Structures are given as structure tokens and as C-alpha cells.
Amino acid sequence: MLRVDEVPDVRPGPGQMLVRVTAAGIGFADVQIRAGLMRTVMPDLPLPFALGFEIAGTVVAVGSGVDAKAVGGQVVGATSGGGYAELAILPASAAVPLPEGLDDRTAVALLGQGATAVGVAEAAGLTSTDTVLVEAAAGGVGSLLVQLAKRAGATVIATARGETKLAVAKQLGADIVVDYSSPDWPQLVRDAVGGSVSVVLESTGGAVSEAAFDLLTPTIGRMVVYGTTSGQPPRFDPLAVYHRAVSVTGFASVALPAHHLARLRDHAFALADSGELRPIIGAVMPLTQAAAAHQAFEERVTVGKTILTP
């Protein structure tokens, strides 16, 4: 259950900032926690719990140990929760000054998903000779990966569900778009590329991942797994990795050292500032409509990033 309540204003503790929120991002973790699907990994999660892990806004107060000159500045950063609010606590160590060339919504859209997309692209080692299959190509990360793969000069096959999402992927530069709600979508990919693909950027899991793995070109194929939005683990035979001489790599931003994640984030910001990367903000909704925003996310009707505004 998700509802909006009036609560006492929070106060910043040592090493913290109090931020008047202007934009909060909806992410996969928010939806999973609200649906009760994270209880095994977060058994001590207090209830009620205020969601929201990505925010941008203006610093209105600071705790001890934080330079008072930060007050009045605009920042973007990752919180440990509580971002769906008018006022939120942000660790000073996680606060990044809002880049001059970016607005608050763009910065939130790139904060986590931009870093993930850059990291996945790096892990895949994309080149101009690659044929790249991007799953969920109209999603927050997928839409960025389409652009990064094209920036590398690769041929991009974008998969998504429905004409609206396929049109978004095409507008972002995808060379080929395939609706993977069609039972024969793997064959449609084979027909379009004349055989196989050299790279799969895998975020779905389940049967989709199994079919995508089978599309990899022997000896040069690379799959980067960075999500399981279906709720099912990726399916492929580990022995097939060996027999076909392909590689499967995992990417998880939560596993990275802070300095590595910061580098990826800053690179995403720089690419956006130069006009080389554009996050798709599919919806901007008031905080009072957070439940409707979550429902749209779960029903997979959202495109790109959804932003909440207090």
C-alpha cells in the first residue's frame, strides 16, 4: 500500500543535508519494496517506510560537520529512503552539485540509470563492428543504452513491447526494432540481422534471456546481465557458454566502490551536458499520484523515467 501522509519535518544529523525536493525518481527498487518483494533481503525494513532513493532539490539546512555554505545550493543525490517528500535527508557525501547544463529532472533520470547504462556499455566493450541487442529499449536504462551503442557506431536491435515503445527506440537511433511480445521475436531478430548478434544487453531474465542468449554469435558473443525485471533469473546453460565460447558478465551498481560509481555517473552527466545522451522522461507526476505512477510502472506502460514532484 502506498499513501501520502503528513509527518513532522525531518532534521539533518551529523554529515547530513536537508533538501527541499524538486524532483524524485521512481526506480525498480521502490516498486519492489512497495510490493513486498524485498522482505527477504531487507528483513529489518521498518514499516511504514518512506520510499524514494533518487532526489534533486535545494539544500535548506545542514547538520554538524557539513559546510554551511552548502545551504541554498542545488544538489542531486542518492538517499537511503524518504525521497518521496517535500523535505528529505541526503548524506552530504552523496550530494552532487547540480551540473550547470542539466535541470533537476534530467539529473535525477541520470543519477542511477545513467551510471548503470555507462557501466553496462563499458562492460560490453562496444565497438563499431558490433551488432547489439538491447532489451527493454524504451525503459530508463534501455533507452540510454540504445544511444550509447549508436555512439559507439554499433548496429542496434531494440526490443520492446508495443508500438509506442518501439517508436521511442526508433527515434533514439535503433536500426531495427522488434516487439518481443511476439512468440517468434528471436526469429524476427535473426531474419533482420542475417543470423546472430555479437552483444546482448540483458535486463529481463526468464525465457527472454534464454532466447537472447541463443542469439549470440559463437566465439565473439558477449552478454551483459544487469537486471531481472521479470522477477525470474536469467536462463542459459552454463555449459553452452563454454561450448560456444561466448562470455556472460554481470553488472550491478550496488557492487561497485563509491569512486567507480561516481566516475560512471559523472560520465553520464558529461555526455548529457554535451548533448550526446538524452534521458527519456516519460512522465512527471505530483507526489499525490505516486500510487498511480507505481501501477503504471508495474503494468509496463511507462516509457523512460518517471519523476515525482512534491
Image (spheres, rainbow, N blue to C red):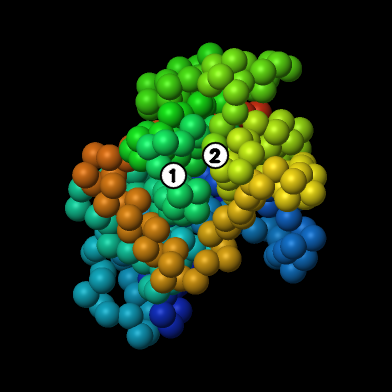
Instruction: Give the Cα distance between marks 1 and 2.
Output: 8 Å
Q: Are marks 1 and 2 in contact (CB under 8 Å)?
A: yes
Residue 175 at x, y = what percent? 43, 22
Quarter assignment of residue 103: top left
Residue at 77 percent of width and 58 percent of height:
39
Q: Which residue is under mark 1?
A: 126
Residue 140 at x, y = what percent? 48, 39
- Closest to the observer, 245 or 255: 245
Q: Residue furthest bottom?
A: 65
Could you say which disc has been placed on residue 199 in the image?
2
Q: Residues within 10 Å of mark 1 (few under 14, many from 20)?
A: many
Residue 252 at x, y = what percent? 58, 57
Amino acid found under the numbered disc labelled 2: Val
Label 2: state its secondary structure: strand
Could you say which disc has been placed on residue 115 in the image?
none
Residue at 72 percent of width and 64 percent of height:
42
Q: Is residue 53 visible?
A: yes
The N terminus lies in quadrant: top right
Amino acid found under the numbered disc labelled 1: Leu
- Closest to the observer, 44 or 206: 206
